[in-house]
Amino acid sequence: VRITAQLIEAASGQHVWAEHYDRSLEDIFALQDEITERIVTSIDPAIRVAETQRAIRKPPESLDSWDHFLRGQWHANKFKKDENAKALQAFQAAIKMDPNFALAHAWLSISHFYHAWLEWSDDPRESLSLSHDCAKKAIALDDMESMAHVAFACANIWLRRHDAAISAGRRAIQLNPSSAPGHFAYVTGLIYDGQPAEAIPVLMEPMRLSPNDPLLFVYYGVAALARLLDGQHEGAVDMVRKAIKIRHGYVFG
């Protein structure tokens, strides 16, 4: 069978996203579950891209908290030092307008984490401390927000609190089984805890769940690291090539 899904903006009739799925109709219930998961994980980034483009077109004086948040994500996903600095400012602006915006606190944590991880910070320890504190704040505001636990996992990985990182990664997946960042955080925690063999069965989940993810090259990079540490050198090289193909010059590729 071929199943086609489309996402259309109702107000304007503008096409936002479409995909078709060719499958064998053997188990209708399993097929329903798979297609539902694929569509849900695909339309979320599609909606965010459309919303971000809308926010970018707005003049600065008309931005609300959500617009600042979307602009922050847009800058953070550029994965560059100057863009990440702009992301920090945007998330801080979102939080200033809405102090209880848990997702903004989570992404502020992630941006501080990027600053430390990629050596953009003059004081990496301070950046990691800020990342940890922002993630804790996000969880305190909304314990059901998956990205808050992803942020907490990332901060704890580089603080070498691996048990806390793995636990947070598991929690992120429990809250949102379709979360590519959740699987990424969990897998990375396992790898840095010296468990690459345990991570490998889960490695491809982020790529499968979100094949158009802005951080797809990072997912491949982590997959390469796990295979390298597990002695699967050819598999590691294959993952590295895929990461570099997506983002030439990726420093961990």
Image (cartoon, rainbow, N blue to C red):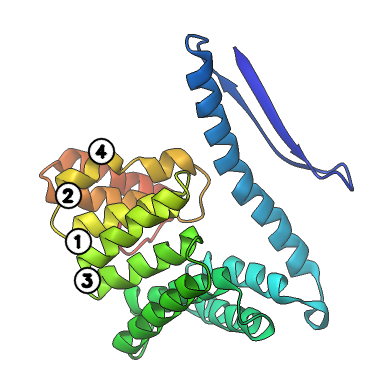
**Mark 2–mark 4 contact, CB under 8 Å?**
no
User: Mark 1 Cα within 10 Å, few/some/many (few <14, many 20+)?
Assistant: some
Determine the secondary structure under disc 2. helix
Give me the C-alpha separation between circle 4 and circle 3: 23 Å
User: Mark 4 Cα within 10 Å, few/some/many (few <14, many 20+)?
Assistant: few
Report the side of 167 relative to 218 (left or right). Answer: left
Give whichever of 221, 184 is nearer the camera: 184
In the picture, the quarter occupied by the C terminus is bottom left
Determine the secondary structure under disc 3. loop
**Mark 3–mark 1 contact, CB under 8 Å?**
no
Res 82 seen here: yes
Determine the secondary structure under disc 1. helix
Give me the C-alpha separation between circle 2 and circle 3: 17 Å
Res 217 seen here: no
From the image, tell me which residue sits under label 2.
196
Lower sequence index among marks 4 and 3: 3
Kindly identify the residue that appears in the image at 43 percent across and 74 percent down.
135
User: Mark 2 Cα within 10 Å, few/some/many (few <14, many 20+)?
Assistant: many
Image coordinates of residue 154 in percent, x first then y, are 34, 67
User: Closer to us: mark 2 or mark 3?
Assistant: 3
From the image, tell me which residue sits under label 3.
161
User: Mark 3 Cα within 10 Å, few/some/many (few <14, many 20+)?
Assistant: some
Give me the C-alpha separation between circle 3 and circle 1: 10 Å
Q: Amino acid at mark 4?
A: Pro
Image coordinates of residue 175 in percent, x first then y, are 46, 52
From the image, tell me which residue sits under label 4.
201
Q: Amino acid at mark 2?
A: Pro
221 versus 18 height, above or below: below
136 versus 218 height, above or below: below
Determine the secondary structure under disc 4. helix
From the image, tell me which residue sits under label 1.
192
89 versus 11 height, above or below: below
